Image (cartoon, grey):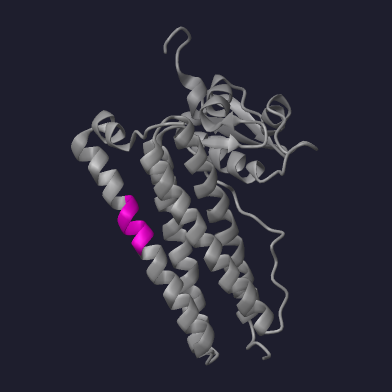
Amino acid sequence: MYLCICHAVTVAEVRQAAEAGPCDFDELVTRFSLGDDDSCGTCLSVLEDLLVEIAPGPAGSPQGASAAVCQRSGQQVACAGATAPEGTE
Amino acid sequence: MRAKPGVVDTLNRLLTIEVTAVNQYFLQSEIVRNWGYDHLADRLRAISMGEMRDIEELVKHILYLEGLPNLQRIDVVKVGETVLENLELDLESEQAAIEALTEGVNLCVEVDDYGTRSRLEEMVRDEETHIDWLETQIEAIGQLGTEQYLAQQLGTGE
């Protein structure tokens, strides 16, 4: 599915970037130009849902211990996708 | 005629859902046509036009109730990267639409607005036929395999 139709960015692209971590909301917004002056901004709610899906629990959740950290508004949540060993696909 | 409390807001919420649906089906239609699946594109286009008629009905009815139709808002337009993903996203959207329409029908019953209620019930019937068609397509893909299904959707091209 396209996460942002305005800039033709797919959920898969953003998920890959987020899972490579650290998946910071603001960093992803900047990297993919989400919600900028040339876009409608409806993608931001989809991005929020995606980050919750990737990192469902707050810091200290089971997959949080060795995970990279996602941040938004100072809140840190575990990024499950970043736990995969390097070199695996 | 002056609207009963909450009815115009509900109709405007439904209008946003319909505007989103028109755009979603239309964009998907042209995307799959570009991939060569003209038969599927024609069907998606027809649904888009049907949703446009729902918009017309809602706009006229909101004005009749002395409200202002809000065509400014649009929800997330869900477009997939494959035919199957598009059909699944449409099914998701239709289910959400029926839920909103049903809430609208319930509100109309509460406030004794039977004119609006019958219009919304008609829209529920339309959306149900879309759901039935979408489920049939998804089921057919499961039974035939994606390649066989898509082979049936190829058109003559332009």
Q: Is residue B142 above or below residue B7?
A: above
Picture quadrant of residue B13: bottom right
Asked if B70 appears above or below A70 in the picture, the reply is: below
Q: Residue A44: give x, y in percent of width and height.
A: 66, 42
- Residue drawn at x 72%, y 37% as measured from the top left: A74
Q: Which portion, as a residue range, is magenta?
A: B129-134
Instruction: Give me the residue at 36% from left, 38% from top.
Output: B84
Asked whether B136 or A55 is in front, the reply is B136
Picture quarter containing residue A14? top right
Q: Quadrant of the C terminus of chain A?
A: top left
Q: Position of residue B134 (x, y in %)?
A: 34, 51
* Residue under the point 34% across and 62% down: B129
Residue B18 vs A20, above or below: the answer is below
Q: Is residue B51 above or below residue B59?
A: above
Q: Is residue B51 visible?
A: yes
Most extreme residue toward the left is B143
Q: Quadrant of residue B73?
A: bottom right
Camera-nearest residue between B85 and A23: B85
In this rendering, position of residue A6 left or right of residue B124 = right
Magenta-colored segment: predominant secondary structure: helix
Asked whether residue A42 is drawn in magenta, I would say no
Q: Position of residue A66 (x, y in %)?
A: 51, 22
Q: Horizontally, is B71 left or right of B111 in the view? A: right
